[in-house]
Amino acid sequence: MTHAALEPRTPAASATVAVRLRDVSAGYGERIALEEITLDLPTGSLVAIFGPNGGGKSTLLKLIAGLVAPTTGTVETLGLPAGKAARRIAYVTQAELVDWSFPVSVWDVAMMGRYPRLGPWRRPDSTDREAVRDALDQVGMLDRAQSQIGELSGGQRRRAFLARAIAADPELYLLDEPVTGVDVTTQEDLMTVLHAETERGRTVIATTHDLAAAAAHFDTVIALNRRLVAMGSASLVLDPEVLSKTYGGHLLVLQDRAVIIDDAHHHDRESGPDRHFHEGRHG
């Protein structure tokens, strides 16, 4: 691959663009999280964002959701300035940031997705209950509807929180690590659901540490390390040059496998220092 192929791609403007960023930088205090990000994501996209801890993946989702304001540049979501279309967006944070000791059932968690539609006074009606029932059925959790959220496995918790997002009937899903650390069956099931949502014209943007999942399940990938390293088809996650530039040289090639070492000095505001090993075939 030539260096030119790694240049960030800026798709042409379109009436069907779900997310548009122009020269966006953002940070927390003096720490810069993202620099000069420009991209368009079409409606109906199934997008994975990958990169090192501290590379700005979660910050990018928060910018799109309107939860973080850019220091420079502009962010448009669903045709409006970021934050102005909140009821049309479902944002699901990392599972590790949730207080799982809170006494709430799986049904209650899914019903939370309906709250923005209810407003301050209306109680859930048959339409809301049907939406929750359908969402739980889609993620395979209807039989656990009355279980306490703290009793669930990691994969079941991710299913429950995806059900909350589906129940909201959003136009845009923003998912932080939705399939990280789950078993293969759960990953396949959740990605089947998300793919079906894009077939309905919804847009799905998810962060991931799992390069194999990004290659197997997503149509478009974004390589991010404070700056936009590359954007394009899922095959980018198998390219050693892209991986090396994305992870700052923390790439080992062992026979036919590219092994990413995501070191402790890569950490961000949302997650503390950690060390992970991620493998993907290349060549």
Image (cartoon, rainbow, N blue to C red):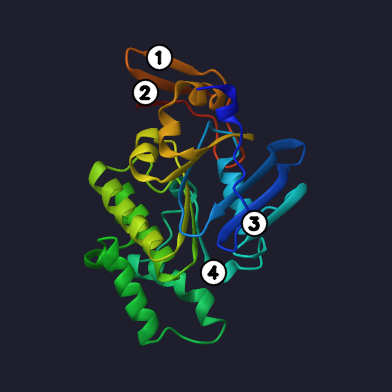
Residue that carries the numbered disc 3 in the rendered image: 67
Disc 2 and disc 1: Cα gap in Å? 9 Å
Disc 4 and disc 2: Cα gap in Å? 38 Å
Of tags 1 and 3, the one toward the viewer is 1
| Residue 179, picture quadrant | top left
Q: Amino acid at mark 3?
A: Leu
Disc 3 and disc 2: Cα gap in Å? 36 Å
Residue that carries the numbered disc 2 in the rendered image: 282
* Mark 3 element type: loop
> Residue at left 45%, top 21%?
240
Q: Earlier in the sequence, mark 4 or mark 3?
A: 3
As displayed, is residue 250 above or below residue 143? above
Q: Nearer the viewer, residue 10 or 268?
A: 10
**The disc label shown at residue 88, or none:** 4
Q: Amino acid at mark 2?
A: His
Q: Earlier in the sequence, mark 4 or mark 2?
A: 4
Q: Amino acid at mark 1?
A: Val
> Residue at left 58%, top 23%?
3
